[in-house]
């Protein structure tokens, strides 16, 4: 390809640019927010960046594959690498059985993203363009470029004077949840991808705390309600903490519907005191720095591009623009990384970028399906979440409850459970005969 254009310079856009740099003479990353050397990485285009983000094991592996040595760089910059029991998972207030094979990074999302951005922008053929995507240029059944507006021009401004066109062999939509690709395509007579939605009405709130000598053996702690409390915060509040690169603790609390956390500092601390030991200890011994930042996530949503029968060539979609799932499972960054890998495999197969990218969309659908299945099946345990129900839900729920209970007591079950949660294994691994048999032995003896 002579030129590829990526709309959106956040996590998914950066990973797409990394992949495309192997296949195009020039890759242009279009982003209106100031995210580079001069920006703090927390522009208005993606305000959720300020929430605690966990990078799952599969996402971490992929990013190290794309950028060899990046973990070492992040650790040198202050991130902590949590291994073994430095990473603690609790269900219904009980610490889960230890597993050796889990490593997680203690670092903020802007820090991880800044490292990825530096590596991407250091590639000789990638350049940033500070602008906003306003539309697609379509010709002969394929995307041939994009219409941009200089940064600073808002989406509401109708004036043409700041608009200009950039031609491309391949256009990537990585514009996140607010992508307007569907509207742009509909305006040109193209059909819209079918959309699945699940309303979850999740509240999130993140705060930072000073970090001292408390919790010397902890990098990450994660607590979630489970079957013993019917997935409600009765035995323990849901929340997590992670050591951040700047010597602070980042703490997130979550709650659904009428139990969403707000901005109030005293209420935040009171909830932390009803959480697992590491969060209680930080509430008691550390000082909150700055404000509590809340975020309201209304619904999980995925667009099923692979189900379309007609789609323009020269156009792909990555990241939240394709699928955005309940963030409590921490899948978004890893999903973007797996979609980027799917794009790499697709382009490496020698297809023309000018053709509809069915091979990519089909591969990406496999990982999106897996993430969707895991998160929506778990979300249906909440009484205010009313569907849609997947086929076999009653069995999945029954088995899921038992496997979760067994994972507290048994390292082998917990290892498979974590492999699925960390997207190293497909959710179907949990209902395979070996795991079910082991679960039965753990719960009911042989
Ligand atoms: C509260 C919360 C907590 C989360 N926690 C986790 C977690 O722990 N772990 C995890 O893996 N994931 C988590 N996620 C999900 C993760 O944040 C997203 O999956 C991820 O940000 C998706 O990246 P993206 O690049 O697709 O989209 P975004 O990060 O949303 O970025 C979209 C980008 O597109 C740009 N843009 C928009 N319109 C245009 C346009 N017209 N032209 C050009 N550019 C445009 C925006 O400025 C922005 O930079 C969380 C999400 C939320 C909401």
Image: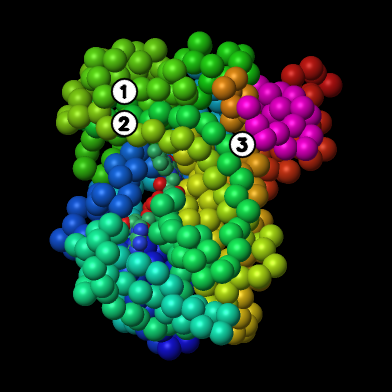
**Under tag 2, what secondary structure?**
strand
Q: Residues within 10 Å of mark 2 (few under 14, many from 20)?
A: many
Residue visible at 23% across and 20% down? 265
Q: Residues within 10 Å of mark 3 (few under 14, many from 20)?
A: many
Query: Is residue 114 positioned above or below 203 on the image?
Result: below
Residue for badge 2:
294
Crowding around mark 1 (Cα neighbors within 10 Å: few <14, some 14 to 19, many 20+) is many
The answer to whether residue 275 is visible is yes
Whether 86 is among the magenta residues is no
Question: Which image quadrant for residue 309?
Answer: bottom right
239 sits to left or right of 307: left
Mark 2 and mark 1: span between their CA atoms? 6 Å
Highlighted range, magenta: 386-406
- Pick the residue in front: 398 or 64: 398
Q: CA distance from mark 3 to mark 2?
A: 22 Å
Mark 2–mark 1 contact, CB under 8 Å?
yes
Q: Secondary structure at mark 3?
A: helix
- 173 vs 443, left or right, is left
Nearest the viewer among 124 and 178 is 178
Is 263 located above or below residue 392 in the figure?
Answer: above
Residue 149 x/y as whole percent: 27, 70
Q: Is residue 59 visible?
A: no
Q: Position of residue 409 (x, y in %)?
A: 63, 22
Query: Of callouts 3 and 1, which one flags the residue occurring earlier in the amino acid sequence?
Result: 1
Q: Are marks 3 and 1 in contact (CB under 8 Å)?
A: no
- Mark before the other along the chain sequence, 3 or 2: 2
The type of colouring in the image is rainbow
Q: What residue is pinned by disc 1?
A: 262
Residue 217: horizontal and vertical position, in percent? 37, 31
The secondary structure type at the circle numbered 1 is loop
Residue located at (54% from left, 16% from top): 232
Residue where numbered disc 3 is placed: 376
């Amino acid at each position: 390809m002579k030129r590829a254009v990526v709309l959106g310079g956040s996590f998914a856009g950066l990973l797409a640019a990394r992949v495309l740099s192997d296949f195009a003479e020039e890759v242009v990353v279009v982003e209106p927010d100031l995210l580079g050397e001069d920006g703090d990485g927390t522009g208005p285009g993606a305000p959720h960046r300020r929430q605690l983000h966990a990078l799952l094991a599969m996402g971490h592996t992929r990013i190290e594959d794309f950028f060899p040595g990046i973990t070492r760089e992040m650790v040198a910059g202050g991130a902590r690498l949590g291994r073994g029991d430095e990473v603690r998972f609790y269900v219904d207030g009980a610490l889960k059985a230890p597993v050796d094979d889990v490593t997680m990074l203690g670092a903020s999302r802007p820090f991880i993203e800044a490292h990825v951005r530096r590596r991407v922008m250091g590639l000789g053929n990638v350049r940033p363009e500070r602008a906003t995507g306003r539309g697609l240029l379509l010709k002969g059944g394929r995307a041939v470029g994009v219409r941009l507006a200089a940064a600073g021009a808002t989406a509401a401004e109708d004036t043409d004077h700041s608009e200009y066109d950039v031609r491309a062999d391949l256009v990537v939509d990585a514009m996140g949840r607010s992508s307007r690709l569907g509207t742009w395509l509909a305006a040109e007579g193209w059909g819209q991808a079918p959309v699945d939605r699940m309303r979850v009405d999740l509240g999130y709130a993140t705060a930072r705390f000073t970090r001292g000598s408390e919790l010397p053996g902890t990098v990450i702690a994660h607590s979630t309600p489970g079957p013993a409390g019917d997935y409600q915060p009765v035995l323990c509040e849901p929340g997590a903490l992670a050591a951040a690169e700047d010597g602070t603790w980042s703490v997130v609390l979550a709650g659904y519907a009428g139990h969403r956390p707000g901005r109030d500092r005293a209420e935040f601390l009171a909830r932390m005191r009803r959480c697992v030991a590491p969060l209680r200890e930080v509430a008691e011994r550390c000082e909150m720095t700055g404000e509590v930042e809340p975020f309201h996530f209304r619904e999980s949503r995925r667009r099923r591009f692979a189900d379309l029968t007609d789609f323009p060539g020269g156009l792909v979609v990555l990241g939240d623009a394709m699928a955005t799932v309940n963030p409590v499972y921490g899948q978004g960054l890893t999903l973007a990384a797996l979609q980027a890998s799917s794009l790499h495999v697709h382009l490496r197969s020698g297809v023309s970028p000018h053709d509809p990218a069915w091979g990519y969309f089909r591969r990406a659908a496999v990982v999106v399906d897996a993430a969707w299945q895991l998160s929506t099946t778990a979300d249906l345990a909440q009484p205010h979440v009313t569907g849609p129900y997947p086929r076999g839900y009653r069995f999945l729920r029954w088995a899921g409850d038992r496997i979760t209970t067994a994972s507290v007591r048994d390292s082998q079950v917990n290892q498979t459970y974590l492999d699925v949660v960390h997207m190293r294994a497909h959710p179907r691994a949990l209902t395979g005969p070996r795991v079910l048999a082991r679960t039965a032995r753990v719960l009911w003896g042989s």
